[in-house]
Structure formats: C-alpha cells, structure tokens
Amino acid sequence: MNQPYTRLDKDNAAVLLVDHQAGLLSLVRDIDPDKFKNNVLALADLARYFDLPTILTTSFENGPNGPLVPELKQLFPDAPFIPRPGQINAWDNEDFVRAVKATGRKQLIIAGVVTEVCVAFPALSALAEGFEVFVITDASGTFNEITRHSAWDRMSGAGAQLMTWFGAACELHRDWRNDVEGLGALFSNHIPDYRNLINSYTTTSHAR
Amino acid sequence: MNQPYTRLDKDNAAVLLVDHQAGLLSLVRDIDPDKFKNNVLALADLARYFDLPTILTTSFENGPNGPLVPELKQLFPDAPFIPRPGQINAWDNEDFVRAVKATGRKQLIIAGVVTEVCVAFPALSALAEGFEVFVITDASGTFNEITRHSAWDRMSGAGAQLMTWFGAACELHRDWRNDVEGLGALFSNHIPDYRNLINSYTTTSHAR
Amino acid sequence: MNQPYTRLDKDNAAVLLVDHQAGLLSLVRDIDPDKFKNNVLALADLARYFDLPTILTTSFENGPNGPLVPELKQLFPDAPFIPRPGQINAWDNEDFVRAVKATGRKQLIIAGVVTEVCVAFPALSALAEGFEVFVITDASGTFNEITRHSAWDRMSGAGAQLMTWFGAACELHRDWRNDVEGLGALFSNHIPDYRNLINSYTTTSHAR
Amino acid sequence: MNQPYTRLDKDNAAVLLVDHQAGLLSLVRDIDPDKFKNNVLALADLARYFDLPTILTTSFENGPNGPLVPELKQLFPDAPFIPRPGQINAWDNEDFVRAVKATGRKQLIIAGVVTEVCVAFPALSALAEGFEVFVITDASGTFNEITRHSAWDRMSGAGAQLMTWFGAACELHRDWRNDVEGLGALFSNHIPDYRNLINSYTTTSHAR
Amino acid sequence: MNQPYTRLDKDNAAVLLVDHQAGLLSLVRDIDPDKFKNNVLALADLARYFDLPTILTTSFENGPNGPLVPELKQLFPDAPFIPRPGQINAWDNEDFVRAVKATGRKQLIIAGVVTEVCVAFPALSALAEGFEVFVITDASGTFNEITRHSAWDRMSGAGAQLMTWFGAACELHRDWRNDVEGLGALFSNHIPDYRNLINSYTTTSHAR
Amino acid sequence: MNQPYTRLDKDNAAVLLVDHQAGLLSLVRDIDPDKFKNNVLALADLARYFDLPTILTTSFENGPNGPLVPELKQLFPDAPFIPRPGQINAWDNEDFVRAVKATGRKQLIIAGVVTEVCVAFPALSALAEGFEVFVITDASGTFNEITRHSAWDRMSGAGAQLMTWFGAACELHRDWRNDVEGLGALFSNHIPDYRNLINSYTTTSHAR
Amino acid sequence: MNQPYTRLDKDNAAVLLVDHQAGLLSLVRDIDPDKFKNNVLALADLARYFDLPTILTTSFENGPNGPLVPELKQLFPDAPFIPRPGQINAWDNEDFVRAVKATGRKQLIIAGVVTEVCVAFPALSALAEGFEVFVITDASGTFNEITRHSAWDRMSGAGAQLMTWFGAACELHRDWRNDVEGLGALFSNHIPDYRNLINSYTTTSHAR
Amino acid sequence: MNQPYTRLDKDNAAVLLVDHQAGLLSLVRDIDPDKFKNNVLALADLARYFDLPTILTTSFENGPNGPLVPELKQLFPDAPFIPRPGQINAWDNEDFVRAVKATGRKQLIIAGVVTEVCVAFPALSALAEGFEVFVITDASGTFNEITRHSAWDRMSGAGAQLMTWFGAACELHRDWRNDVEGLGALFSNHIPDYRNLINSYTTTSHAR
C-alpha cells in the first residue's frame, strides 16, 4: 500500500534540467532569487560531482523566455541540449525522450521552471513509462505557494518522490568515506552555514 | 497504487464555474482580491480560448450572495446558466448534471467559491460518477488556509487533481506551434511578469 | 484506490467534543483565540441546529486542565457528559464508546483540544472500528503548525476526512429549501462577512 | 514638534512616476505582481481623473531596464517624459526638475521602482528644496521588506508623508458631491471588493 | 523633543466611530474578520462602560458602503449620529465637528474603516486644532499592511498616539478598585484567554 | 486502503536520536532554536520517563559537524552510542542496525538533524525492513519549509507516521492513572503554558 | 533634534519586572512561549549577574491573573516585591515608586506583561519624571503584532529606548575582559546557537 | 524638525565591517543565510568598487565567535584590521576609532553582526561624535525581527540613516555615465534578477 523505498543510485540516475531560462526565472516567486539561484547551481554541481548524465532543454530561447542560464551551459558543455520547437511537456519532444533513454538510467532527477508545468508534465509522463522520478523541489520554482503545493500534490500522488538537492546529494553519496573533500567543497560552496562550520573548525583545529 | 497520469485534453474537457458571486467573494480571504479576480478571469479566458464547453451556476443570486460576477456573464453569453433554487452541491441539481453530461466531456475543470463547499461537493460527486476532475485551486477561494488545505486533502484523497489556471492552460495547449499569438496574449493579460518579458523583448528586438 | 465520497448525513452523524477545557485552551496557538472560540461555538450551534446527538468529554476538569467551556455545558444540558478518570484517548473509556454506540450513528464528527491527541487518538480508534470519521479541523486546536500538520497527515492517512464547521454544515443541510432562516442565522452569528452581506442586502432591499 | 497636517490639494499637486520600466519591475518582490500592477495603474488613473500634472521619467530604456510600462505611456501621451541619460536620482536631471517646477505645484506625489532609490532619492531632494512630498507606498516597489522599511524610515524621517493611492485619491477628492460616478468607477476598476459591493448593491436596488 | 505623556482621562475623552459600515467592512483585510468584529464591539462596550460621549458617523449608508453595523446603532441609541452627505474627512462636516466640540472633551479616541482615510483624516484635522488624539489601531481596519503602516506613520508623525482598545480601557480605568466586576466582564466578553483564566480560577476556588 | 491504526506501545518502542550535533544544529532553520532545543530535550526526557531503549548516533563528531549535544550524552550514559565512520544513512551502519535489533522493539521513534537525510534515510530503510516508524517531526530540524515538507511527503508516502513529542508521550502513557506526577513534571518542564496552568491551579487551590 | 546616546550603565541602572504572572502569560501571543520564557529568565539572570537593583510587582496575584512566575520569586528573594492592590500603572503605586527611587538609579530597564499596559504605562510615567527608560522588548509580551507595534510607537515617541535582553547585557558589560566566564555562561544558557558554538569550539580545541 | 538630506559621497565615506565572523553568523536568523552572505559580499564589493576606506574589526576570533569570514579578509588585504581584545562596542577601542579618524571621512557606512550590538553601539557612538552614520540594514543580521526592529528604532531615533547595500551603491555612484560596466557587473553578481535582465537583453540584442 505504501511507496517502497526507492533509493537514488549514482549509477542509475540522470538529471533533467528543464527551462531554467533567464526570462522565465522572473516568474519564480515562491523562493527568494538568491536562494533559488544557489539551489539550481548546487544541483548542477551535484550532477557534475557524481558524473550523472545530464540533459538540458529549453523552450523558445530566442523569445521572451530568454536564454538558458549561462552558468548551466558552461557547466555542461557536452550535455545533450534540446531546444524544444514548441512542445510544452519536454516528454512530448522525441529528441528529449531519446536523449533520456540513451542514458540507460531508470532514475530521473528533475528540476525546472515553472514547477507545475515544466517539471510536473515530464515527471508525470516519465512515471507513466515506468521511470523512477525524483523531483528536486528546491531547484524548481513557480508563481506562489498555491501553485507549488498543487503541483507537489499531483506529482506525489502519481508516485514521484519529492527531494531537495542536499538530500539527493547525500543519498547519492552514501558514505563520506567515498570522498570527503569534494562533497565537502560542494556543500561549503552552497550552504553558508556549513561553510561557517568548516571555517570555524579549521581555524580552531589549526590553532593548536 | 499511484494515480495514473490523466492528462487534460481540450477535446474532452469542460469547465464548471460555481458560485463566483459578488457577495460570496467577500468571504474569500485565502487569496488576495486582486490576484483572485485575475485568476478567475484568466480561467474564463482560458475556457474561451480553448472553446471548452462552460457551465455557470449560482446560488441565490437575488439574495445576499449577490449576482454572478458580471464579467463572467459577459464572457459566456450562450453558456448554460443554472441558478440553483437551493441545492448547495451543484451536482444535486438535475439541470446542472444534465448540462454537464450534455457536453459529452469526461474531464471536468472546476473552480468556485468557497472551495470546501461549492468546489469540493460537486468535485466529489463527479468523481463518484467516474468523471476525471481537475480542481483549479487558484481560481477557487475560501476563508483561510485551514479551510483550503482541509478541502484540498479531501478532494485529492478522492482522486481529484489539483491544478492551477496556468498549468491547465499549458496542459491543454500541448504545443506552442498550435498558436503563439493567442495564448501569448492570454498570458500577457494575466501574468504581469510575463507581460514585462514580452515588452522588454519586443522593444529590444525591434531596436536592432 | 481513492477514497470514496462519504457524505455527511444528518440522520447518521453524531458530534464528539473532546476536552474543550478552559485550561487546555491556553495551549492552542495555531489558531487565533477569537477565531477559535467562534469556530467551537459554531460547531456546537451546528450540532444543535441539525439535532445531532452530541457527546461531551473532559480530562481532569478539577485540575489545571480546567473546566469544560461553560457555553458548551449550557448548549448541551442533556448530552452525555463523560469526565474521563484518566484515559487520554477518549475511545479507551468504555462509557464514552458506549455513549457513541448508543447514538446508533456511523458518522462521527470530531473536534477537540489538542488536535494530535484528543482528536487524533479517538479518530484513529473509531476508524479502526469502522466508523466514518470527519475531523472538524478549525474547531480543533494545537500548539503550532508542525503539530497540526503532523496530526492531519496521520488522520488523513488513516481515512479520516478533514472538514471545517462551515463545510460540515453545508453538507449536512444539502438544500437551502429545507430552511433558510435558521441556517442563515447560524452563519450570520459566526461569519462576520456573511452578516455584513445580509445587513447590506436587507437595508438595500427594504429601501425600495 | 510634530508634523503639521499638510493636506493634498488637487490644485497644488503633481505626480512623478519614476522608472516603472518592464525590466526593473522584475526586481519588485515586496508586493505581489498582480497587486502592484493594479496599484500603479490606479495611481495613473487617479492622476488623470484629477487632472494632475504628471511627469514620467526612465533610466536607460534601451538597455536591460526595459521600456516604460506601455500603459503609462498611453495614459499620458502629452506628459513631459524625461529619459535620463545617466542620473540615478531624477532630481539630478535638470530637465526633470525644470519640468517639475514648470507645473507650479508645491505638492509632489511620487512613486517608482525601486523604492529606496528611484523614489527615495528625488523625494529627499525635493524635500530639501521645500516641496511637500507624498510617497505613494503601494505604487512603489522594491526587493523585500528590509529594503522597503529602511527606505520608509529614511523618507519619513526627512518629512515625507507616506500615503497610498486610495488615501491620496480620497484626500484629493474631499467630497463625494464633487462627483460620484467618476471616482466610483476608478475605485470599481481597481478594488475588486468595492466592485463587488457596487454590483451587489445595484442588483438589489434594481430588483425592487 | 519627545512626546509628553498625555494620559487618557475618562472625564476628558470622547469616542468617534467613523464609517464602520457593513459594506466597507469587506474592504478590511489587515485584520481577521472575527477578531476585527470583536475589537470594534469591545471599543463600543468600553465607551459605554466609561460613559464616554460617543459620536457615530457614516458615509453614504444607502449606497454600496452599506448600513452602519447594527450592533453599534443599538449600543448608542442616543448618541449623535451624523450621516455625512459627501465629506470624506468627517472633520469637514460641520455637524460632526460641532458634535465633537459639544462634548467639551479634549481627548479624542478614534477608530474607523478604512484606517488611512476615515481614521487618519479626522485624526490629522483634530490634531491641527489642538485636540489630543488616540487612534485605536485594532478597531481600525484597512486593505493590507502597507496601507496600515503608511497610515500609522503619518498619524504618529503628526502627534497621534497609537493605542488599542485594551490599552485604552486600562488607561481610562486607572485602578481596579474603582470596579472589578464591570471591567472584568468586559474583558471576559472580548478576550477568550481572559475568560478562560476566570473560568479556571472560579472553578478552582469554588472547589475548596 | 488506508493506514491501519498502529499505536505506540511503551513495551515495543525504541528511540533513535540521529546526529543532534552542535555544528549541524546551526543548519536547522525551520524551527526557532529555543523551541527546537526544548523539543529535543523533551523527547529525550520522554525516552527516559518511559524507559525506552534509546540509541544515539553521530556523524563525524570530531569534524565541523561538532559533538553530540552534551545534554543527550548525559541523559543516556549507558545507551548504545554509534559514531558512524562515514555512512550517511545510519541504517547502512551495521552496528547501528544491530543495536536497533538488539532492543527487540518493532516500533521505532526517530528524530534527528537534518530531517530529509538523517531522519528520512533510516526511517525509509526501517520501513522497508518491516519496522513501524514514528517520526518526531518537532524534534527533527532542517533548512527550511521546502525541505521539511518534501521530507514529510516522502516519509509519509512510505508509511511513516508523523508525530510530535507531546503526541508520542500521550500515546505511550495511555492513562494518567498510571502516573500523574512524573508525566506532569515532564510537561511542566517543556511546555511553559502547561507550567503556568499548574502554577495558577496550585496557587488557587492552596489558597482555600 | 535626535535622541542623544544614553548608554546603559551598570552602576546607574535598575530593573523593573512588571506582572510576569502565570495567568497573564496566557495572553501573550506575539512571541512563542518557549522563547518568551527564555527571554524573561535571561533578563532575570542578567539583572542578577550585574547586581542590578530589581523590583518585582504584580497585579491581583490571588485572582485569575495568577501568581508571579515562581522562578522570578526564587531568583530575587530579597528584592522589593510590590503586589499592587489595584493600580494598573505600577507608577501609580506609591510603594513601587518609592522602591524605584530608593535604588538611586536613573536608568530603568523595564519589561512586563502586557506590553501596551504593564510596560508602557510605567515607562511613560517614568520618562515624564526624567528617568531614562530602556524597554526590553523581547521580555515583554502582548496579544499580537498590532498591539506590540502600537505600544512601541507610543513609548519610542516619548523617548524610551527599545532594547532586547542581549543588547542590554552587552551594553552593561562594556568589555569582555571584565569577565568572560560568567557572561559566557549566561549567554550559553539562554542562546542555544551560542551554546553550540561553545560546545563545538571546546571540543575542537581540546582535541588537539 | 526633520532630518536634512545627508547624501552619501564617495569622497567622504568610509566602510566599517564589524564582527562578520563565522561563529557569530550562526546567530543571524532574521535574514536567510544565502541572502545574507550575498548582501555582505555585495557591500564588500561596493566598498572596493568605490575605493572607500574600509576597516575590519572582530571580537575574539580565536574563540567560539570564530574567524572573520575569509572572503572579507581576502577582499581587503591592506585594510586596517582591529581584533578587539574585549571591547564590545568597537568605538570603545582606541585603535578602531583612530583608524576611523585616520580616513578623514565624515560619513560612516556600518554593517555587522549582531545588529543591536555590533552595529548599534558604534553607530550611536559615532553619531554622538558628529559623524554621519549610514547603517546597511541588509548586511547586518541578528536573532529575529524583534531584535532587528528594536535596534532600528534606537539607531534611527538617534539620527542614523537606514540604507541597504543597493541604495548605498546607487547614492554613491550618482550617475551611470561615470561607469556602466563596473557597477553593472557588481549588480549582476549580486542580484540574480538583474543578471537575468542583462542576459536576456544581451541575447536579444545580439540576435539582430
């Protein structure tokens, strides 16, 4: 009756970044812009850190929606990039689905703008095709809390797991003994409180 | 175990606007009045844009509940309009159900005032009769967040999908190549941030 | 898979008011005291208006928990009143369960203080015995939003329906033609916005 | 010791609209976009209704700040329009000050984006030159509540009066006997609750 | 440099209730309706308890603004009641000012709807004429927090003292030995937490 | 279809306190620090009061995560304490699981920092192995409400029951006749409102 | 024109704790009870730490207002304790004023319940008599934010300085070289974040 | 009577950064950490951009307060850095005051942690010595909104001007013609919405 525990596996997961475009970002008002920018870049860094296949897609980059956030383009120079000619649900775009399936991964980590459309539509489609879907809620933005919670309810009801970038990173990493430096740096770069802990600790322990 | 992906289809959807009356609107305090008015009119424009069969109903227009919001009457001059003589659940009114069934549609997009009564009751009844129900949460208003979330929980638990007018519009449209101008205008009229994007884009691209 | 539509029926419903005691009310901080007092009394008026069998129970009235709110005692002078000698879950008290079963009703409308204990425990027990449970969320109070939403999640997951006093009143009434004056007065007494609508309407229509 | 009562006078007031530009509006996050758009247009309608001399100014319309909101251009086709070549404080622009002084008015109603810069700077400069300054707080937007309240504190401390578009309209009008229709229409267009009152009243009084 | 301590004196204070009308109340969205109704009636009860001269005034009772809240009319059957024919600032109405001056009081306790207009305008005018003005902030309502705080800033800057009904009652009473029963009853009727304290105390002390 | 009522049983429950470390606590920003500290200590006191087997675990105590909160160490001097060498999910640590299983308990009460990782991961793992899991939501902290609600959704969907320390204490105690003094003291120490009730009651009843 | 910098001086300051009574505390709803209890006790500890003359007063301890919080009585066994027979403004009680003047101090640190009455009234009276008044805002509680901010505005306008217990402690201490241990312990006991810093620091520095 | 317009002048302003230390930052809970980190670094970048003399100071870097945020040390390698041996008010430290006076500047831009102590104390002292003080409110953090607003009230009442880093940058710059690139880059780095505007604009204008 309950959802089984489907655990993120770095050898079986891919990341889909949907429509993080400069214009569309001005629609995001359920998360503060400083925090949202940080969350999206943290997810991107995480995808790189774990070497997860990553797919970028946009909707009408040359119109008012604006270009893909340049940092994302720079972080994934070789990733499949599918500028959709019109499909609102990225999953309706054959190139996009082909790219997803080409990764051979069954776990899809999805984030995008706006949550109830660019995230929810492909998430629901992927679930319908048997993928395991993990929505990164804090790297997905939308108009307000009503739209956010409506979208969450719909995706969760269909079997998507709601996670955040930090939770996903921890679940992918499994064990700090795999590597402390790299993940620690990632956390330090994206969690000011964590950076402060590290700075205080380092200073104190060096002071001996 | 999970909800399957039931996707809005413009050839199979109808819109039910329940009790958006001038008096009852003063009860709505979970959404700011400027935003709520905008959301309701956006949903109405959406219904017209996609040529969805639309049904209007009211409760005691001649009493303190007040008249149907005039803009809705003007937008749907030929739509079935069922002033209910007393039934609180619109689905208890035979004329209303008959009008719904006459559309031949199986997907019902419902919004109204107040959420836990005028929306939830017919939503639950329609679900019980096998309709697919999509509640437009941001065009439905109520007293406060406790009443809102109680109503959402009840409807979602019964199988209703919680959507917003923007998400519904996007799911109905499927592909921008079907039409850019019309839907773009609808978004521009109801999303100030989107209008700004278009204005900035147009100015810049014309400036070349 | 979804919850079926279980509709409140005035011939099959009973009301359980659990531990609305003067001392315990000072623990309620998730709803403003003016509003909470109003909601509890509205639920009580509703129970009387629909002649629903009503059961009162308290925990340690003579200690710091304080006496039952006097208005409730006055409104239900002949209702079963079960001061529990120690059981925290009212359903663990045989007199209470006996009183519930004596009503012959299968639908239980429950409210109390605090939500996650005095409401949730008997609600879960009653569900386990096959009763249909309707929690009146806005006449149930607790420490804060974390305790509230944790309790809602637990009760909803077990099959309880989350409603509010206004939604319950509307679902019980079914049709305004059954009576306008009485229910209108109840709403006017407990919803200031509604009272204003009636006052404005009456003045204007009498002014002709 | 206290501020004297300086009352807005429609024969002595002018309106300054500073940098309401499509791009800059995306920086405004202390007021919801639907409400903010409505407030700015209400202020503009008010300026026209009372025939107040109105001055428009922008900063870098051809760059990322974007064009002046087109509705404002359309509402004031003949108003002085000063696109500033670089001055951040509009009062540092001689053309702007000359236009202000050409109105012969001593009371300046100021609104703009963002509050702590485009509004506060000319407000402080105008106060320093002896003008009476009325800041329309709800037609001025900025990043967040910290920036808003810092700006309010600075302007209020310097002698500016903080008002809103509705308060300004009422103070300018003085007496409804001057005109009911026009101002009533303005309020009906910009205050949904007021529009509902009028619709309910009209329906009821016509129903006699 | 600082405001001197001007203390409310029951022999020198009058109460002005401005435009608490059924229609206008639907505009009040900065205070919850249950609480606001309670605060206004508490202020009215306070005026009667201390036998303060009280003046009622309204704006267009026969139009959409709606009738004066009936409870106020009933509480003050013999009070001067000035339905203003058009003046927005009650102080612009000669009958109103005459009624105020006829009381012979120098301290004016003012509350009304909406704060930035119906309260602020007469408050500023009265201050300009040398009255001591006490605004009852929690019995005055308006659209939102921006309008509220703008109005407070303007009134406070002009020398008005911001108080609440409870603070005013306490300052007027001075000493509980003047009377415990009456004021206690007033507090019990309007402060649920206080009523609970009394109920618990009475029960416990009687139980000995 | 619904969750059955699984009731906490003091003879079948164990408590897992995961990573309440001085450094990690600075990451907790969804609950105020004063309240959070109180909730964690209340849960600890509860574990001792009911003599529940309790297991402590930490992650990298000697690094920036900081030491286990000293009060916890002092309260459970003899409890199994598993400093994990690297496993993020405590359930991945064999010593931890062995300690859990050694208790012979089937009901696991879990709290920790941060909710979506240190609580959710072992909760999901334990559910997958057939344990009954009770998450103490108010003794578990995380970055913000988005991370909190995402974690709750995931855990609740997998069958965890969301409870709070007060609800858990009440469900474990069952009947006040088992002991009034001890649990009363625990509540008095951790619920200021409750302490006030007791102080008022004691004073009044002693005054006879 | 501006307030001069009046700096708290431990040799010239006294502390007045007004009506922190068990019953009245249930009226405090603008600060969470856990935090409020902590703030009040922190202020008390501060008074003892700096050996400031401290005066306690209550209103009707034997009635529903309830007894003085026992911790305060225990902390100041020898302090003047003035149970007022009826005066609401403590400054109207001759014993209280005499006790204040007997301290010989000119700086009064005041906190109490509720802010707009028990704090504001004596604060305004003391200012009128030439004392320097420092209101400890976070150890003073009231019904809600409207009552709080109204009281702050009135007191600040009359020349009171708004401080918090932490700010007062720091201003009184002047220099950590006067004593690190004692004040550090006080902060550690009342600021969980600070305690965590100390615990982490101590652990790390001892680990060398 | 009002504050005159004292305008920031890049040739007369200095920046004081007080106690932005890794440990103390964990006390800041009135601004989200992502945003606060950004604001502090924006202020630092601003100080460098305008070549303002900048002074750094800390309190007990080697204890639990933790080291100065390393980014600040790196940005100002040659700035006076005064680690205070104990003085809480930086102005009580002679080296600090000497460094301030050595700049020859009369306008002091101050930010720090926590607002009511590390910012307010030197701000009040500097005002008392005739400096013009500009508090950067959004680069100063503290425990909560009560402490923040108490501190603001005290500083503003003493004549400090409350500004934000963006407002300060704009007032210092005066005219975009002085330089577009540099300040534009600074804004782009610290205001995600602004960066998006620039990215959209650049893409569109290059696309011609």
Image (cartoon, coloured by chain):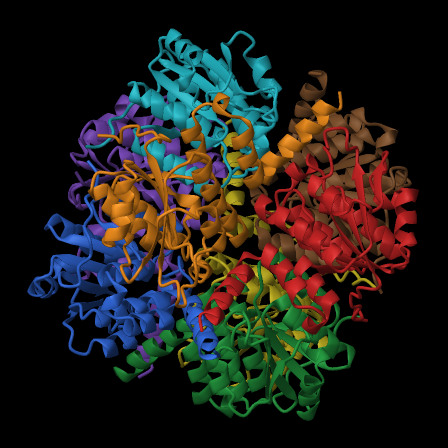
Chain colours: A red, B brown, C yellow, D cyan, E purple, F green, G blue, H orange
Going 63% across and 45% down the picture, which residue do you hit?
A144
Q: Is residue F200 visible?
A: yes
Image side of residue F165 versus residue C127, left or right: left
Q: Quadrant of residue H207?
A: top right
Q: Nearer the viewer, residue D151 or C76?
A: D151
Q: Quadrant of the C terminus of chain F?
A: bottom left
> Residue A72: x and y, percent?
72, 44
Q: What residue is drawn where x is 44% and y is 62%? A: H23
Residue drawn at (71%, 79%) of the image: F91
Is H180 located above or below residue D150 in the figure? above
Picture coordinates of residue G56, whole percent (x, y): 19, 69
Q: Is residue C73 left or right of residue H57?
A: right
Residue G45 lies, in percent from the top left, at 27, 71
Q: Can residue D195 be seen?
A: no
In the rendered image, the vertical position of residue B97 relative to residue G48, given as above or below: above
* Residue at position x 11%, y 57% in the image: G106
Q: Quadrant of the N terminus of chain F?
A: bottom right
Residue that lies at the very extreme toward the front in this rendered image = H78
